[in-house]
Image: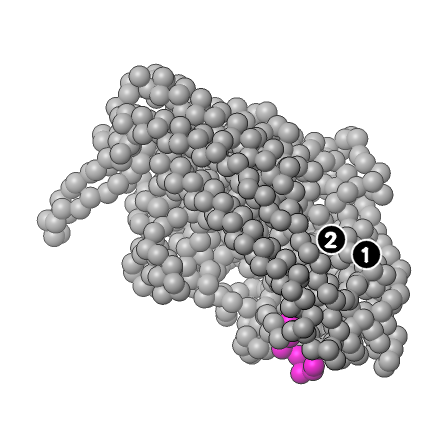
Amino acid sequence: MLKRIVFLSFFTLTFGTVLAQNITGFSAENVADQLDLEAQFEARLSAENLDTWMQRLAAEPHWVGTEYGKENAEWMMEQFKSWGYDTKIETYHILFPYPKIRELKLLGPEPYQATLKAVPVEGDPYTAQGDALLPSYNAFSTDGDVEAELVFVNYGIPSDYEELEKLGIDVKGKIVIAKYYGSWRGIKPKLAAEKGAIGCIIYSDPEDDGYVRGDVYPEGAFKNKTGVQRGSVMDMPLYPGDVLTPGYAATKDAKRLDRDKAPTITKIPVLPISYEDAQPLLAALGGPVAPDNWKGGLPLTYHIGPGPARVHLKLEFDWKITPAHNVIATLKGRTYPDQWVMRGNHHDAWVHGANDPVSGMIALMEEARVIGELAKQGTRPKRTIVYAAWDAEEPGLIGSTEWVEDHEDELQEKLVAYVNTDGNGRGFFRAGGSHTLQSMVREVADAVKDPQTGVSIKERRIAAQMVNGGDNSFTLSALGSGSDYTPFIQHAGIASLNIGFGGENAGGEYHTIYDTYPHYKRFKDPEFAYGVTLANAAGRIVLRIANADVLPFEFKQWQSTVEGYLKEIMDETDKKRQAIEKHNKLVAQNAYQLAADPRKPFAKPARKEAVPYLDFSPLQNSLAQLGQRIEELEGLELESLPANKQEALNKALKETEQVLTESSGLPRRPWFRHQLYAPGFYTGYGVKTLPGVREAIEQNNWKEAQQQIEKLSGTFLAMDEHLKKLISLAE
């Protein structure tokens, strides 16, 4: 057992009972001071501030490039300055499309003109701001003017197209209509284009976030019939950030790609619509009845098509270079000013953004306020703390990505860890990130109380896990994409976390005109109790990393997690082999055709290529070697080292995540360098662990799979060398 955890016992004055507190990374003599600092920090957090600041930040629409977005950035800069931070705004110049023409018509059998407009609701004046509200559209759809038969493709994910193939339905030359959910929205037009479709429509089905789930706004939290989810459809699994400056910063004078050569702009036009506008289109479809698991909550029989519904889709955008304003606030560390801990949340929104992102932004601000206040009173952290309010997250993680690309060398030299939040709500603690940080996050979760139950946020989360069929362990989820941690961990190789609360705040307001202060106060976190709890949890994490004697990275749990990922891949490969063997046997026996209804469409399935036996031994051997090295490191008393050795050790520890990256990146997307975690090529936000190996197997690319096994083994051997270095520094 790595002797990184020390125990402090003390008698309380009131009860005289003995308590124990674990803190990873702190020497015995420094634990009491850290606990006292965290107690002071928690005591000063104010829900009233969060309420006031949300009303300020979410008062008007503030997507990237708006005047109110700039005013918000300048206002936040002044707040950070008043709290003692050296603060500036760093501006990048990015491509952002604003909709000029949005037309959708059902040409027949019964003509219908889509309204493409959400209605204001009684009791929420923010929804009645008229032309100030951003029209509903999908950013980074290409311009287009197309007309074709319509095909319903369920969620528009790979398994849905496999189902269409079984039915003999081809979307080539058609316009597809897909439901939101099931995957990140950008995957839907990406796959549709690959299958030959010429246009894509995405609608919100009431089964997913409308009246099937609960009462609709304003009576309840869920999406009413006119609500439309905005959002980017940029092909972010290739690279996030400004579409014209891949891999380098979008400064004012940066060299830019021609727009028609930007690979992350969609190949076909795509438009989001409400379920009010979707219903006539779906009702006009003929063809086979959709499978049961495709049917949604609208009062109609779901057919697939193609036709007889025929639609005309016309989109045109104003493609402009737009300023994106990042607020960067720095509190210099007293001992290690060149070791940074960074904390970020975005400030731009599709409309008002009370939940996404303001609920997270105000928690960050309150956390920064209190840490700044404590620093003024003499408890300045050992390491430098940097707070960031990112712009242009919504259209594609642009503000944070451009900043990371601009400062990459300095970040890789100085940044210890990045802690991200986004929207926040009522419920359970959610945490994902680098598994070297899992032990430290678990300890913090054990120290922070849930405001509704009084138990720790760790205990409440574990209870929910067990009730829902899980175990009683506290683990971090792996990070894919979807928020501003992406450029830090996936590109720059910085240990990262993404945390928040939710699970008891469901609704249909996401990226609509209904994500407002009144909606948040009624249905999300009415007393801002979980906003305070988020500030408490994130602030403790930041303070522990900032003040630790030895950076709180732990490798035993990291090792077991990675071994679990490898076992998953090996088991899934075996299952795939068995499934294909069974499939091919049934094809040979003509079983599928004999079992099919002769009166329904049917396409005889083809024989599939057999799954070969891959050689996983390079990974198994390198992980076994790593395990031995970790056992050796575990036996060292790192916190008892002299200060000069701890300093050298910390400089090496902060490079750990970079060792897990590879400069050539992943196949066909070199921007993503991390070899353990990446967003899936066909999932978008959803993570793929050991992605090079896993995705090659999923795509039946056996030669590439074996190559990626060898490459990943090399990463593990590099990690072994890194651990050797840590051990030598500690001896």
Name the amino acid type tagged 1. Gly
Residue 337 in picture, x, y percent from top left: 45, 25
58 vs 538, left or right, is right
- Where disc 2 sits, the SS reads helix
Q: What residue did someone put label 2 on? A: 190
Picture coordinates of residue 211, whole percent (x, y):
59, 77
Q: Is residue 297 magenta-colored? A: yes
Q: Is residue 314 visible?
A: no
Decide: few, some or many residues near mark 1? Use Cα within 10 Å; few <14, some 14-19, many ≥20. Answer: some
Over which residues does the magenta segment extend? 294-301
The kind of secondary structure the magenta stretch mainly shows is loop
Q: Is residue 704 left or right of residue 538?
A: right
Residue lying at 63% horizontally and 41% vertically, measured from the top left = 702
- Specify whether residue 411 is painted magenta: no
Q: Is residue 543 left or right of residue 227?
A: left
Q: How is the image coloured?
A: one colour
In the rendered view of the protein, which quadrant contains the N terminus?
top left
The residue under label 1 is 196
Q: Amino acid at mark 2?
A: Lys
Residue 144: x and y in percent read 86, 57
